[in-house]
Amino acid sequence: MSDVQTPYWIELLHTQVRQIQGKYRTRIIEAGSGPALILLHGTGGHAENYALNIAELARHFHVIALDFLWHGKSQTEGYDPEIIPVLVDQVVDVMDQLGLASAFVEGQSLGGWVAMQLALRHPERVDALVLTTTMGYTPDAGAIEGYVEPDWASNLPSSLEVLREPSFDNVRTRMARILANPQRLTDEAVKVRQALYCQPELAAVQMEFISEYLAGPTIRQHLVTDALAAQISQPTLVYWGEKNRTPPALGEHIARRVRNGTFHCARDTGHWAQFESASEHNEVVAAFLGSLPSAEKTIMTPPLNPVGRWEILSWEQAFDDGRRELPMGEHLHGFILYTEGGHMSCMIARAQRPNFETGGQWNASDAEKAGAYSSLLAYGGRYELNGDVITHFVDISLFPNWVGGAQKRRFDVNDDGTLTLSARLEEGTPQARSARLVWRRADV
């Protein structure tokens, strides 16, 4: 036996282990109460990657550690070589099944990659991030002096071999390379991983997964760039290991690139930082998340009484490719109106729209008509309020494609009484983006 920790399942005796079925079948380990904290593991791992963290963090938070798709005891079917969008969707599915409007999210390695993309694609669902030795980040050329991305493909032959022949020694060798001191790896941790790799369906899909993850081109279209990182506005702790294969300079760079970043580096620690420096990790993460003013927000979202007229203050769209646009410019006006009878209407216009000069309402030039369309958004219909989501059921719209559809908006009632409506639009297309509109209640 290794001469370090007490067997970690003693730490997990008071947790709940179960599978939940929504859009996906996901195994979770759950413990504690308070603000929700979701833990996302690394490549080839499983929820037990956080075995030394769950019980301690559950003293402060409602902790949910999950097995990613094609990992652990979650579903093995439905493999998609793009990987990242599906794993992001899985996290959202878990949150929906547990009734979590938003949560703190920690991701280690692959989990950090997913966590960053979750914050970009669904910013309203993420209250804060902890990025532990994250993968999936590509800095601009020359942004980090002397930085060269490691040759991850060189790990592929040994990673495939352990899946073909999951002996104790092979599994231990695979896991030991992510620690600064392999003597800290317990036999229990190896045996749990070995038992999972001995599942034929898991081993088969893991071979596909690891081949794409380490050496494939498809997943790389979802790398997080410096431009994308600059869109991450949530408080972010970047937790690193001094002896991680990608050096602390990368972690420091990420912490600078996000809008509200903090960096911490654990000494004598490798890639599996939350395991190898568990006590330090738990103390630093609990202090970071516990200090945030948004912590109470994960427990209860302030109630919304939408009835009345709200005036638009701002409208911003952040595209997944790094673009940021103001659809109606900095100066705009308009309103959204909700009635007690369940009806709504919305009109937003660019300020100082030019008059037509070449004709009347119906016979103006095509160019002027197009300009009028581009400078106004208008639609209406019914609405429903469910938790912190307000849904607009559109029955008339300037944009005819919306008619007959449902537009879901997550709302936040801000401390100053303003209302923020946010949504994801055109998911899966080159125009995929996050929209954020801020409103102020008007006298009616």
Image: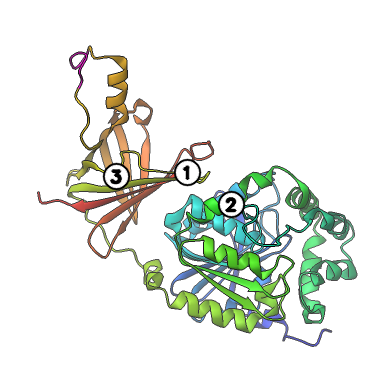
- Pinpoint residue 405: horizontal percent, then vertical percent: 37, 34
Residue numbers of the magenta segment: 356-362
Please name the colour scheme applied to the rendered image: rainbow
Q: Which residue is mark 3?
A: 330
Question: Which residue is rendered at x = 54% and y = 76% of the image?
Answer: 285
The amino acid pointed to by label 1 is Arg
Q: How would you rate the neighbour count of disc 2 (Cα within 10 Å): few for under 14, some for 14-19, many for 20 or more?
A: some
Please state if 100 lies on the left or on the right of 30 as rendered. left
Of the image marks 1 and 2, the number of the one nearer the N terminus: 2
- Pinpoint residue 283: horizontal percent, then vertical percent: 55, 83
Pointers 2 and 3 in contact (C-beta within 8 Å) = no
Q: Which residue is mark 1?
A: 323
Looking at this view, name the residue that lies furthest to the left. Answer: 444
Q: CA distance from mark 1 to mark 3?
A: 16 Å
Question: Which residue is rendered at x = 20% and y = 47% of the image?
Answer: 311
Q: Is 57 drawn above or below residue 334 in the view shown? A: below
Q: CA distance from mark 2 to mark 3?
A: 27 Å
Q: Nearer the viewer, residue 401 or 359?
A: 359
Q: Nearer the viewer, residue 108 or 29?
A: 108
The amino acid pointed to by label 3 is Glu
Q: Which residue is mark 2?
A: 225
Q: Is residue 361 magenta?
A: yes
Question: Which residue is rendered at x = 60% and y = 79% of the image?
Answer: 281
Element at label 2:
strand
Q: Quadrant of the N terminus?
A: bottom right
- Pinpoint residue 438: horizontal percent, then vertical percent: 29, 51
The amino acid pointed to by label 2 is Thr
Give residue 271's mark.
none
Q: Main secondary structure of the magenta part?
A: loop
Of the image marks 1 and 3, the number of the one nearer the N terminus: 1
Q: How would you rate the neighbour count of disc 1 (Cα within 10 Å): few for under 14, some for 14-19, many for 20 or more?
A: few
